[in-house]
Amino acid sequence: MAEGFAATGAEVWVTDVNAAALADVPDGWQARQVDAADEPAVAALFAEVGAAGGLDVLCANAGVAGPTAPVEDVALADWRACVSVNLEGAFLAAKYAAPLMKLAGQGSLVLTSSTAGIYGYPNRAPYAAAKWAVIGLMKTLAMELGPFGIRANAICPGAVEGPRMEGVLDREAALKGMSRDAVYTGYAAGTSMRTWVTAEDVANMAVFLGSDAARRVSGQVIAVDGHTENPDPKV
């Protein structure tokens, strides 16, 4: 997403809880180590953004996969950790972005949900619950902030190629007694396009939603997933 916005000439700020992930950001980007679920840290970040000139587009994309287990085996601490980042992180970002956008009389909030937030997902109860809640948050933000010229939308990625899904594949394979390759194939087989998606596919949608080309698009849930047909990937 950051690369996509940077390519349009935008001034880009990125955050991560992991400082190592920020070590090699391109020249010209602003990078800050921030825990998305830490309210004082988030408040300080947006105060800095406001002092630097304001905010046009927010991509609330911080997330964790959470446990992969039947609901009876999910520890409450793991549930809370997953919901804290995926839902409360989006809430805090919106809470502190909204005043900056109100001052400008415009803005675009792009929240990352998931196809798990549309269909539910077996053995991923905390993640699916949080991602459903992100959609409810987005719908409310669109209604609440629309009169101020601020739009809100949610992107629902499907299975995205990359390191984050590698851990999910390994855990699902172990849980289902399947090979990792079989689980990987099952994700693609569960879409009408028979494909995974790339980070660039998701970023392209975020850039569109942040642009004037989407100036009348708000309150929408937009899947970038190759059209998921089966939310429980099988071979």
Image (spheres, rainbow, N blue to C red):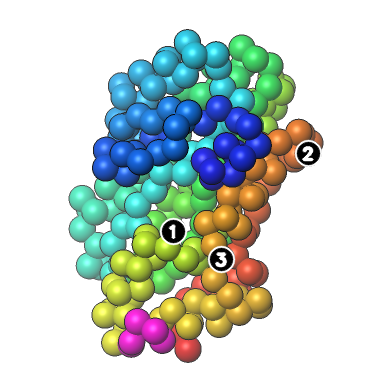
Corner quadrant of residue 148: top right
Q: Mark 1 — residue?
A: 128
Mark 1 or 2, closer to the camera: 2
Of the image marks 3 and 2, the number of the one nearer the N terminus: 3
The residue mark sitting in front, 1 or 3, is 3
- Callout 3 amino acid: Val
Question: Residue 180 colored magenta?
Answer: yes
Residue designated by label 2: 213
Q: Earlier in the sequence, mark 1 or mark 2?
A: 1
Q: Is residue 136 above or below residue 97?
A: below
Task: Specify the segment rendered in magenta.
Answer: 178-182
CA gap, disc 3 to disc 2? 23 Å
Taking the spot 47% from the left edge, 44% from the top edge, the residue there is 61
The residue that appears at 31% across and 32% down in the rendered structure is 33
Where disc 1 sits, the SS reads helix
Q: Amino acid at mark 1?
A: Ala
Residue pictured at 52% horizontal, 41% vertical: 2
Residue in the image at 39% along x and 84% along y: 181
User: What number is the disc on residue 197?
Assistant: 3
